[in-house]
Amino acid sequence: MQRTPIAFLGSLDAAEEERYRAALSAAMPEEVVRPFRMLTQAERAAVEIAIVANPDPSEVAQLPRLAWIQSLWAGVERLVRDLGPGAPPIVRLVDPELARTMAEAVLAWTYYLQRDMPAYRRQQETGLWRQRPYRAPADTTVGLLGLGALGKAAAQRLVQAGFRVAAWTRSAPAEDGSLAGVATAFGPDGLPDLLGRSDIVVCLLPLTAETHGLLDAGRLAAMKPGAALINVARGAIVVTDALIAALDTGHLEHAVLDVFETEPLPTASPLWRHPKITVLPHVTGPTNHGSAAAVVASNLRAYRETRRVPAAVDVARGY
Protein backbone atom coordinates (compact mmCIF):
# COMPACT_ATOMS: atom_id res chain seq x y z
CA MET A 1 0.00 0.00 0.00
CA GLN A 2 1.43 3.36 -1.02
CA ARG A 3 1.79 5.81 1.83
CA THR A 4 0.45 9.33 1.53
CA PRO A 5 3.08 12.09 1.82
CA ILE A 6 3.69 13.76 5.15
CA ALA A 7 2.88 17.46 4.98
CA PHE A 8 5.48 19.91 6.26
CA LEU A 9 4.04 23.28 7.30
CA GLY A 10 5.71 26.23 8.95
CA SER A 11 6.67 29.88 8.85
CA LEU A 12 10.36 29.15 8.31
CA ASP A 13 12.70 30.74 5.83
CA ALA A 14 13.74 28.62 2.86
CA ALA A 15 17.12 27.62 4.30
CA GLU A 16 15.68 26.53 7.65
CA GLU A 17 12.86 24.64 5.96
CA GLU A 18 15.36 22.75 3.86
CA ARG A 19 17.52 21.88 6.88
CA TYR A 20 14.50 20.39 8.63
CA ARG A 21 13.28 18.59 5.51
CA ALA A 22 16.72 17.10 4.87
CA ALA A 23 17.06 15.93 8.49
CA LEU A 24 13.58 14.40 8.46
CA SER A 25 14.17 12.64 5.15
CA ALA A 26 17.48 11.22 6.38
CA ALA A 27 15.87 9.95 9.60
CA MET A 28 12.98 8.25 7.79
CA PRO A 29 13.90 7.54 4.17
CA GLU A 30 10.82 5.35 3.83
CA GLU A 31 8.60 8.44 4.08
CA VAL A 32 8.01 11.36 1.69
CA VAL A 33 8.12 14.69 3.52
CA ARG A 34 6.76 17.43 1.29
CA PRO A 35 6.22 21.16 1.98
CA PHE A 36 2.56 22.14 1.93
CA ARG A 37 2.97 24.37 -1.13
CA MET A 38 4.26 21.39 -3.13
CA LEU A 39 1.33 19.09 -2.35
CA THR A 40 -1.28 18.54 -5.04
CA GLN A 41 -4.94 19.02 -4.20
CA ALA A 42 -5.38 15.23 -4.20
CA GLU A 43 -2.44 14.81 -1.81
CA ARG A 44 -3.78 17.52 0.52
CA ALA A 45 -7.09 15.67 0.64
CA ALA A 46 -5.34 12.42 1.60
CA VAL A 47 -2.59 13.54 4.04
CA GLU A 48 -2.79 11.81 7.44
CA ILE A 49 0.15 13.38 9.26
CA ALA A 50 1.55 16.91 9.34
CA ILE A 51 4.89 18.02 10.78
CA VAL A 52 4.66 21.67 11.76
CA ALA A 53 6.69 24.64 12.96
CA ASN A 54 4.39 27.59 13.62
CA PRO A 55 2.07 26.77 10.70
CA ASP A 56 -0.57 28.91 9.05
CA PRO A 57 -3.91 27.63 10.46
CA SER A 58 -5.56 28.16 7.07
CA GLU A 59 -3.14 25.68 5.52
CA VAL A 60 -3.79 23.11 8.25
CA ALA A 61 -7.51 23.49 7.53
CA GLN A 62 -6.86 22.35 3.96
CA LEU A 63 -5.79 18.90 5.20
CA PRO A 64 -9.19 17.37 6.07
CA ARG A 65 -7.98 13.82 6.81
CA LEU A 66 -5.27 14.67 9.35
CA ALA A 67 -5.03 12.01 12.04
CA TRP A 68 -2.49 13.98 14.08
CA ILE A 69 0.00 16.83 14.03
CA GLN A 70 3.65 16.54 15.10
CA SER A 71 5.13 19.79 16.37
CA LEU A 72 8.85 20.40 15.97
CA TRP A 73 8.90 22.45 19.17
CA ALA A 74 8.30 21.67 22.82
CA GLY A 75 6.13 24.75 23.31
CA VAL A 76 2.72 24.32 21.67
CA GLU A 77 0.52 26.97 23.27
CA ARG A 78 0.41 29.12 20.11
CA LEU A 79 -0.38 26.06 18.01
CA VAL A 80 -3.20 25.06 20.36
CA ARG A 81 -4.57 28.61 20.31
CA ASP A 82 -4.33 29.10 16.56
CA LEU A 83 -5.82 25.75 15.55
CA GLY A 84 -8.61 25.83 18.10
CA PRO A 85 -10.52 23.05 19.88
CA GLY A 86 -11.43 21.23 16.67
CA ALA A 87 -7.81 20.52 15.72
CA PRO A 88 -6.50 16.96 15.34
CA PRO A 89 -4.35 15.62 18.20
CA ILE A 90 -1.16 17.68 18.59
CA VAL A 91 2.04 15.90 19.63
CA ARG A 92 4.75 18.11 21.11
CA LEU A 93 8.44 17.42 20.65
CA VAL A 94 9.94 15.60 23.64
CA ASP A 95 13.63 15.55 22.73
CA PRO A 96 16.32 14.52 25.24
CA GLU A 97 18.80 16.77 23.42
CA LEU A 98 16.51 19.76 23.90
CA ALA A 99 16.28 18.98 27.61
CA ARG A 100 20.07 18.74 27.81
CA THR A 101 20.69 22.07 26.09
CA MET A 102 18.00 23.79 28.16
CA ALA A 103 19.47 22.44 31.40
CA GLU A 104 22.94 23.50 30.25
CA ALA A 105 21.70 27.05 29.65
CA VAL A 106 19.85 27.23 32.97
CA LEU A 107 23.04 26.20 34.76
CA ALA A 108 25.10 28.73 32.78
CA TRP A 109 22.81 31.65 33.59
CA THR A 110 22.53 30.54 37.21
CA TYR A 111 26.33 30.70 37.45
CA TYR A 112 26.22 34.11 35.75
CA LEU A 113 24.02 35.42 38.55
CA GLN A 114 25.60 33.47 41.41
CA ARG A 115 29.05 34.86 40.51
CA ASP A 116 27.73 38.45 40.21
CA MET A 117 28.61 38.85 36.54
CA PRO A 118 25.99 41.61 35.95
CA ALA A 119 27.50 43.68 38.76
CA TYR A 120 31.03 43.20 37.38
CA ARG A 121 29.77 44.30 33.97
CA ARG A 122 28.41 47.51 35.49
CA GLN A 123 31.71 48.04 37.31
CA GLN A 124 33.60 47.66 34.04
CA GLU A 125 31.46 50.36 32.44
CA THR A 126 32.52 52.83 35.13
CA GLY A 127 36.12 51.65 35.49
CA LEU A 128 35.52 50.41 39.03
CA TRP A 129 37.94 47.77 40.37
CA ARG A 130 36.15 46.08 43.28
CA GLN A 131 36.00 42.42 44.30
CA ARG A 132 32.63 41.25 45.53
CA PRO A 133 32.07 38.63 48.25
CA TYR A 134 31.92 35.06 46.94
CA ARG A 135 28.64 33.17 47.34
CA ALA A 136 28.98 29.39 47.02
CA PRO A 137 26.42 27.22 45.19
CA ALA A 138 25.68 25.48 48.50
CA ASP A 139 24.64 28.86 49.89
CA THR A 140 22.42 29.67 46.91
CA THR A 141 18.82 28.47 46.59
CA VAL A 142 17.53 28.13 43.04
CA GLY A 143 13.76 27.90 42.76
CA LEU A 144 12.37 26.30 39.60
CA LEU A 145 8.87 27.05 38.41
CA GLY A 146 7.80 23.97 36.48
CA LEU A 147 8.87 20.34 36.64
CA GLY A 148 8.20 18.95 33.20
CA ALA A 149 10.91 17.21 31.20
CA LEU A 150 12.88 20.44 30.89
CA GLY A 151 12.45 21.37 34.54
CA LYS A 152 13.58 17.96 35.74
CA ALA A 153 16.69 18.08 33.55
CA ALA A 154 17.55 21.55 34.85
CA ALA A 155 16.98 20.45 38.45
CA GLN A 156 19.37 17.53 38.06
CA ARG A 157 22.13 19.72 36.60
CA LEU A 158 21.75 22.28 39.38
CA VAL A 159 21.81 19.63 42.11
CA GLN A 160 24.95 18.11 40.56
CA ALA A 161 26.57 21.55 40.59
CA GLY A 162 25.97 21.87 44.32
CA PHE A 163 23.10 24.36 44.40
CA ARG A 164 20.22 24.09 46.83
CA VAL A 165 17.28 23.38 44.54
CA ALA A 166 13.57 23.80 45.15
CA ALA A 167 10.76 23.49 42.63
CA TRP A 168 7.12 24.44 42.35
CA THR A 169 4.38 22.92 40.22
CA ARG A 170 0.70 23.77 39.95
CA SER A 171 -0.31 20.27 41.04
CA ALA A 172 1.42 17.65 43.19
CA PRO A 173 4.31 16.05 41.26
CA ALA A 174 4.40 12.28 40.92
CA GLU A 175 6.93 10.39 42.99
CA ASP A 176 10.07 10.42 40.89
CA GLY A 177 13.57 9.28 41.76
CA SER A 178 14.98 11.88 39.34
CA LEU A 179 14.06 14.58 41.85
CA ALA A 180 16.42 13.45 44.59
CA GLY A 181 17.78 16.50 46.34
CA VAL A 182 14.96 18.77 45.13
CA ALA A 183 12.52 20.26 47.65
CA THR A 184 9.12 20.38 45.95
CA ALA A 185 6.06 22.52 46.58
CA PHE A 186 2.80 22.77 44.67
CA GLY A 187 -0.44 24.64 44.39
CA PRO A 188 -1.29 28.26 45.17
CA ASP A 189 -0.07 27.97 48.76
CA GLY A 190 3.33 26.61 47.77
CA LEU A 191 4.30 29.39 45.36
CA PRO A 192 4.81 32.30 47.80
CA ASP A 193 7.02 30.13 50.02
CA LEU A 194 9.25 29.11 47.11
CA LEU A 195 9.50 32.68 45.83
CA GLY A 196 10.33 33.98 49.29
CA ARG A 197 13.29 31.66 49.89
CA SER A 198 14.88 31.50 46.44
CA ASP A 199 17.95 33.56 45.59
CA ILE A 200 17.39 32.84 41.89
CA VAL A 201 14.00 31.97 40.40
CA VAL A 202 13.96 30.13 37.05
CA CYS A 203 10.72 30.09 35.07
CA LEU A 204 10.20 26.92 33.02
CA LEU A 205 6.39 26.84 32.93
CA PRO A 206 4.22 26.37 29.85
CA LEU A 207 2.06 29.34 28.89
CA THR A 208 -1.57 28.61 29.71
CA ALA A 209 -4.56 30.62 30.91
CA GLU A 210 -3.42 29.89 34.48
CA THR A 211 0.21 30.96 34.00
CA HIS A 212 -0.39 34.05 31.84
CA GLY A 213 0.77 36.97 34.00
CA LEU A 214 1.60 34.62 36.88
CA LEU A 215 4.63 36.66 37.93
CA ASP A 216 2.79 39.90 38.50
CA ALA A 217 3.56 42.75 40.90
CA GLY A 218 2.29 40.81 43.91
CA ARG A 219 4.28 37.66 43.23
CA LEU A 220 7.42 39.59 42.29
CA ALA A 221 7.06 41.43 45.61
CA ALA A 222 6.90 38.02 47.32
CA MET A 223 10.36 37.17 45.99
CA LYS A 224 13.32 37.38 48.35
CA PRO A 225 14.82 40.90 48.47
CA GLY A 226 17.88 41.02 46.22
CA ALA A 227 16.85 37.89 44.30
CA ALA A 228 17.18 37.44 40.54
CA LEU A 229 14.91 36.01 37.86
CA ILE A 230 15.64 33.85 34.82
CA ASN A 231 12.79 33.46 32.33
CA VAL A 232 13.37 30.84 29.64
CA ALA A 233 9.71 29.81 29.32
CA ARG A 234 7.34 32.34 27.72
CA GLY A 235 7.40 36.12 27.93
CA ALA A 236 3.74 36.53 28.86
CA ILE A 237 4.23 34.68 32.16
CA VAL A 238 6.05 37.74 33.55
CA VAL A 239 4.32 41.14 33.72
CA THR A 240 6.97 43.36 32.15
CA ASP A 241 6.03 46.66 33.83
CA ALA A 242 5.92 44.99 37.23
CA LEU A 243 9.34 43.43 36.65
CA ILE A 244 10.88 46.76 35.66
CA ALA A 245 9.38 48.37 38.76
CA ALA A 246 10.78 45.62 41.03
CA LEU A 247 14.24 46.10 39.50
CA ASP A 248 14.06 49.92 39.70
CA THR A 249 13.18 49.87 43.40
CA GLY A 250 16.03 47.47 44.12
CA HIS A 251 13.75 44.72 45.37
CA LEU A 252 15.12 42.47 42.64
CA GLU A 253 18.78 42.54 41.62
CA HIS A 254 18.72 41.29 38.02
CA ALA A 255 16.65 39.50 35.38
CA VAL A 256 17.84 37.30 32.52
CA LEU A 257 15.15 37.22 29.84
CA ASP A 258 15.29 34.88 26.85
CA VAL A 259 11.60 35.09 25.90
CA PHE A 260 9.24 37.98 25.22
CA GLU A 261 5.59 38.56 24.35
CA THR A 262 6.67 40.04 21.02
CA GLU A 263 9.64 38.47 19.23
CA PRO A 264 11.94 39.78 17.92
CA LEU A 265 11.94 42.22 20.83
CA PRO A 266 11.14 45.67 19.39
CA THR A 267 14.12 48.04 19.36
CA ALA A 268 12.06 50.62 21.28
CA SER A 269 11.52 48.25 24.23
CA PRO A 270 12.99 49.57 27.49
CA LEU A 271 14.19 46.05 28.27
CA TRP A 272 17.11 46.47 25.85
CA ARG A 273 18.62 49.36 27.79
CA HIS A 274 17.77 48.48 31.38
CA PRO A 275 21.01 48.10 33.38
CA LYS A 276 19.58 45.24 35.45
CA ILE A 277 18.26 43.16 32.56
CA THR A 278 20.14 40.75 30.31
CA VAL A 279 18.31 40.31 27.00
CA LEU A 280 18.80 37.12 24.98
CA PRO A 281 17.32 36.46 21.50
CA HIS A 282 15.45 33.24 22.41
CA VAL A 283 18.54 31.03 22.34
CA THR A 284 18.24 28.93 25.49
CA GLY A 285 16.64 25.82 23.97
CA PRO A 286 17.51 25.62 20.27
CA THR A 287 16.07 22.66 18.40
CA ASN A 288 18.68 20.24 17.10
CA HIS A 289 17.57 19.24 13.62
CA GLY A 290 19.07 15.74 13.78
CA SER A 291 17.82 14.76 17.23
CA ALA A 292 14.38 16.28 16.58
CA ALA A 293 14.11 14.33 13.33
CA ALA A 294 15.02 11.11 15.14
CA VAL A 295 12.24 11.68 17.71
CA VAL A 296 9.72 12.45 14.96
CA ALA A 297 10.78 9.37 12.98
CA SER A 298 10.30 7.17 16.04
CA ASN A 299 6.80 8.57 16.60
CA LEU A 300 5.88 8.05 12.95
CA ARG A 301 7.15 4.48 12.78
CA ALA A 302 5.23 3.57 15.93
CA TYR A 303 2.09 5.06 14.41
CA ARG A 304 2.55 3.20 11.13
CA GLU A 305 2.93 -0.08 13.03
CA THR A 306 0.14 0.34 15.60
CA ARG A 307 -2.10 3.10 14.19
CA ARG A 308 -2.03 4.64 17.66
CA VAL A 309 -1.41 8.37 17.86
CA PRO A 310 1.50 9.27 20.19
CA ALA A 311 0.72 10.94 23.51
CA ALA A 312 -0.90 14.23 22.57
CA VAL A 313 -1.35 17.64 24.16
CA ASP A 314 -4.22 18.07 26.62
CA VAL A 315 -5.96 20.97 24.85
CA ALA A 316 -7.87 21.96 27.98
CA ARG A 317 -4.61 22.39 29.92
CA GLY A 318 -2.73 23.84 26.94
CA TYR A 319 0.26 21.47 27.04
Image: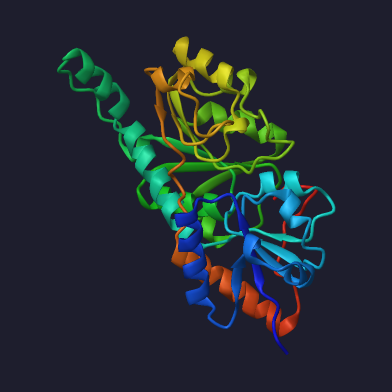
Work out whether residue 204 or residue 259 is closer to the camera in this orientation and state it: 259
In the displayed structure image, the side of residue 149 where residue 319 appears, left or right: right
Applied colour scheme? rainbow
Q: Position of residue 167 (x, y in %)?
A: 56, 43
User: Residue at 50% of width from left, 33% of height from top?
Assistant: 264
Residue, x 59% and y 28% (percent of image)?
238
**Is 213 above or below relative to 51?**
above
- Number of numbered discs visible in the structure rendering: 0
| Above or below, 240 relative to 291 | above
Q: Position of residue 81 (x, y in %)?
A: 74, 44
| Left or right: 72 as drawn, with respect to 110 | right
Which residue ends up furthest to the right in the rendered image?
Answer: 86
Residue at left offset 59%, top offset 71%: 33
The quadrant the N terminus occupies is: bottom right
Q: Is residue 81 above or below residue 15?
A: above
Q: Position of residue 177 (x, y in %)?
A: 55, 61
Give the vertical position of 18 relative to 156 (above or below).
below
Residue 137 falls left or right of residue 309:
left
| Front position in the image: 205 or 312 | 312
**Residue at image coords 14%, 18%:** 129
Q: Nearer the viewer, residue 249 or 276?
A: 276
Q: Position of residue 62 (x, y in %)?
A: 78, 59
